[in-house]
Amino acid sequence: MTGMLCYGASALPALAGDADAGKDVFKQECAECHTTKEGKNKKGPSLFGIVGRNAGSIADYNYSDALKNAKWVWTEDKLHWYLSQPAKQANPGTKMKYSGLDNAKQLDDLISYLQTNH
């Protein structure tokens, strides 16, 4: 029975990031251009409710054609993919100037924080 418990424990998915730590990552990496306040855009669109939202879909933000035409939903996996590389590589033609976040823990924390904003 113990062997089965150990085997089962190793098959568990990775733990989610720390949303509190992610708030600090947001302040360092994102807050210059984005906010998590609903209905408030800065240089970039509000990230309130981003998880589960269609890309380029806030009506009162002037997205690049590249993002308006991106046919994806901002899932946890899509955010991880997008934010882990330069924005212009992830979505050629985007207006976003971001070089990507290569620290996996900070990225997980950031995405956990973004998931709390809805």
Image: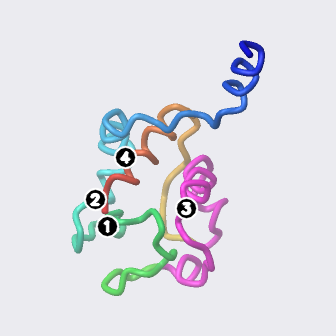
The disc label shown at residue 75, or none: 3
Left or right position of 13 against 57: right
Q: Measuring 72% from the left and 13% from the top, which residue is drawn there?
A: 2
**Residue mark closest to the camera, 3 vs 1:** 3
What residue is rendered at 43% in x and 43% in y?
110
- Mark 3 or mark 2, earlier in chain: 2
Secondary structure beneath dot 2 equals loop
Q: Earlier in the sequence, mark 4 or mark 3?
A: 3
Of marks 3 and 1, which one's residue comes earlier in the chain? Answer: 1
N-terminal label among 2 and 4: 2
Instruction: Please name the amino acid that badge 2 sits on.
Output: Thr
| Residue behind mark 4 | 113
Give the image location of residue 108, x and y in percent: 51, 40
Which residue corresponds to mark 2? Answer: 36
- What range is drawn magenta here? 64-93
Q: Amino acid at mark 1?
A: Ser
Q: Is residue 66 magenta?
A: yes
Q: Earlier in the sequence, mark 1 or mark 2?
A: 2
The answer to whether marks 2 and 4 mark residues whose Cβ atoms lie closer than 8 Å is no
